[in-house]
Image (cartoon, coloured by chain):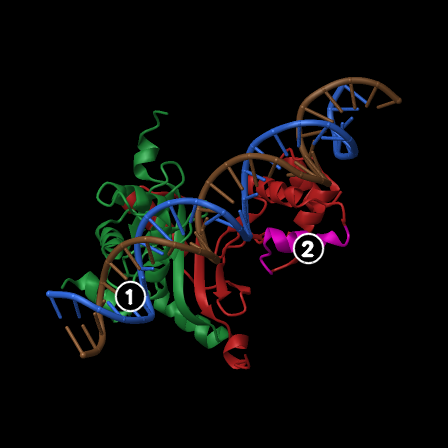
Chain colours: A red, B green, C brown, D blue
Amino acid sequence: MNKLAENLKANRLKVTPQRLAIYSYLASTNEHPTVETIYNHLKEDYPAMSLATVYKTVASLRDCHLIREFNLGEDCNRYDANSDVHAHLLCTKCHRVFDYYGDIDLKHVIYRLKTDFGFETSALDMNFYGICDDCKNNNDK
Amino acid sequence: MNKLAENLKANRLKVTPQRLAIYSYLASTNEHPTVETIYNHLKEDYPAMSLATVYKTVASLRDCHLIREFNLGEDCNRYDANSDVHAHLLCTKCHRVFDYYGDIDLKHVIYRLKTDFGFETSALDMNFYGICDDCKNNNDK
DNA sequence: CTTTAATTGATAATAGTTATTTATTAGACG
DNA sequence: CGTCTAATAAATAACTATTATCAATTAAAG
């Protein structure tokens, strides 16, 4: 039994082909896909899969913290199975999202939030908006 | 003529009572209101104001950078006229949003993004999700 | 194998946002 | 100050991402 199936079982989620496919895809990509993207990507191998199933599955995976759901000011959410602490860089031109594993002292900030304000942090987003290197160079169109 | 009206003029936006009211309200609060909240707050003084006007106005103000639009994983956007660099703390229990003006070395990160990846940052969000002090103490309900 | 509760697929419903259209108005110009 | 015109507002229809519903299917426990 693979790791993904074990994670599902550990969270009392039934191991279905649909869930394995969605979770597996998210674990294999760093494209931060939307529900639409996930659906289109899996349509070929799972032609019967419903869009509603994708929505329900990402909600389940998010609820048991197997994936992260986030919004970068677009009209839809994005999903990410990468649990390492990292920032997201959204290129406002090509709409790709890049990861940044930087030297940002987040533990220090989380500690300050707790001691100074009594705020108990359980998750965080760090999002940068701008123009990526490719788009800066490719000024054609 | 007040500062708000001057800002509107500087961006070639007509100075209308609706825009002044919405912009003025955003400049006066630190509650990070949603469109719904803005609409309800102004309904008393401007009973004829349409919800569509609020949507169009915040879009205009956002487009000329007089306010910021952001999303904290809720089902609607929030707006903020505070242009100082700061983080947002969303209490996932009472759904209030607090500001944090911390010692986060963002200039350093922005510089690294540019030199290491060629990413030109034009805006950023730093969002912390957790439980605020009030909610931690008020465990009643 | 049987049973049962969870899940899927199809689709209707919901909610936030945007588009459309007509009436109104800010502000330029004389 | 009155006239004119393009921009804006109000009302509401349309759109789209997401959620809810429900009958059919299936994972998995016994």
Quadrant, the C terminus of chain B: top left
Asked whether C10 or B51 is in front, the reply is B51
Query: At x 44% / y 65%, what residue is drawn?
Result: A129
Q: Quadrant of residue D3?
A: bottom left
Q: Which residue is mark 1?
A: B13
In terms of depth relative to the viewer, which is nearer, B17 or A128?
Answer: B17
Callout 2, which amino acid?
Answer: Asn
Q: Secondary structure at mark 1?
A: loop
Residue A64 on the magenta segment: no
Task: Tally the marks.
Answer: 2
| Residue B91 image point, x, y percent | 37, 41
On the rendered structure, is A72 left or right of C6? left
Give the amino acid at mark 1: Leu
Residue B34 in sight from this viewpoint: no
Q: Nearer the viewer, mark 2 or mark 1?
A: 1
Indicate whether residue A32 is drawn in magenta: yes
* Label 2: few (<14), some (14–19) or many (≥20) C-alpha neighbours in 10 Å: some
Name the residue: 60% across, 39% down.
A60
Q: Which residue is mark 2?
A: A40
Q: Secondary structure at mark 2?
A: helix
Span highlighted in magenta in the image? A31-45
